[in-house]
Amino acid sequence: MLKGLYVALVTPFAEDGSLNEEKLRELVRFHIDAGTDGLVPCATTSENPTYTWEEHFRIIEIVVEEAAGKLKVVAGCGTNSTSKSIENIKKAKELGVDGAMVVTPYYNKPTQEGLYAHFMKLADDGRLPLMLYNVPGRTGLNMKPSTVARLSQHDLIVAVKEASGSVEQMAEIIMLCEGRINLLSGDDTITLPILTIGGTGVVSVVGNIVPKDVRAMISAYEKGDLDEARVLHYKLLPLNQSMFIETNPMPVKEAMNMLGMAVGNVRLPLVRMLPENLVKLAAALTDYGLEVKNRPA
């Protein structure tokens, strides 16, 4: 079900820091035109920790409305509270999403058995297709392949976004799950390697600015044109790396603003990038062949 290019959608803010609803609709249309397979609103790249719950569900509502079935919408719904995550999943389901992305519980750091019980409860009670999200660098917790394999037995646990950075771990997940679950890369820099071991796509950050190119790389691989896929992988690599000069989503939002996409600033506790890093980011965009309309001073 979940494969190809999914974009962890940036949340645009107005000058006063409020949600820019029209710009959000414009971004969804941009991805429809680009051939993006699906959007993931209310994820880390979307700055979801800074939302009110009213904003959270308004964002989902707008993305679903504008997508109008032309691409999939998998909304970020996970928290470190099982009961709150279930509430989020149910509300997102009412709003018409195709699935929910649910992160491993942060801060409280459950055991592997706790993770299993948590995600099974979300699937049983939420009744919506789920994409598990393993991102140890953000949560302080790594979900083991054996746990993913157990969870893959549930018919509503259909995918995992893997951002551990370990290709070995991802290969083990694919091997143990035996096709019951799709694995998507959580890191743009290793999307092609993950495809070669049996992954099915990516939840992308750089896809916010060059979705056609990321989709072209995936399509080339799917068609068996490994040489073309490799060329696109290496073309994208420096740009992918530039998206993490500072904490995501600071660089991608700065990049979008430099390119004239006008998505506004990040919300506290994130701040503007350092001047020297803005210069590096602008250079990466220019080197890629993109037109920097708003160059840093």
Image (cartoon, rainbow, N blue to C red):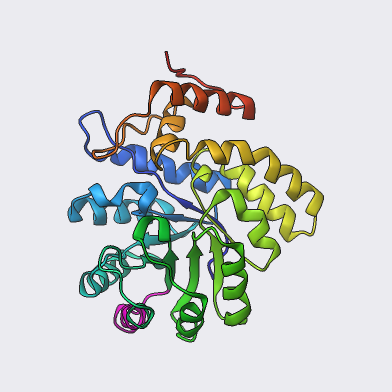
Name above or below for residue 202 compared with residue 120.
above
Name above or below for residue 41 compared with residue 134.
above
- For the point 42% across and 37% down, which residue is it? 246
Q: x%, y% of residue 37?
A: 54, 56
Image-quadrant location for residue 119:
bottom left
Q: x%, y% of residue 150?
A: 47, 85
- Left or right of 86? Residue 7 is right
In the displayed orientation, state which residue is furthest to the top.
297
Indicate the quadrant containing the C terminus: top left, top right, bottom left or bottom right: top left
Name above or below for residue 271 compared with residue 131.
above
- Magenta highlight on residue 127: yes
Q: Which residues are magenta?
A: 117-129
Q: Nearer the viewer, residue 276 or 56?
A: 276
- Magenta highlight on residue 250: no
Q: x%, y% of residue 109?
A: 30, 69
Q: x%, y% of residue 41?
A: 37, 53
Indicate the quadrant containing the N terminus: top left, top right, bottom left or bottom right: bottom right
Image-quadrant location for residue 165:
bottom right
Q: Nearer the viewer, residue 198 or 69?
A: 198
- Left or right of 165? Residue 17 is left
- Left or right of 192? Residue 127 is left
> In this figure, what is the number of numbered marks?
0
Name above or below for residue 275 compared with residue 12.
above
Image-quadrant location for residue 154:
bottom left
Q: Nearer the viewer, residue 180 or 13?
A: 180
Magenta segment main secondary structure = helix
Q: Nearer the viewer, residue 10 or 63?
A: 10
- For the point 19% across and 56% down, which residue is it? 53
- For the point 42% across and 48% down, which residue is it? 9
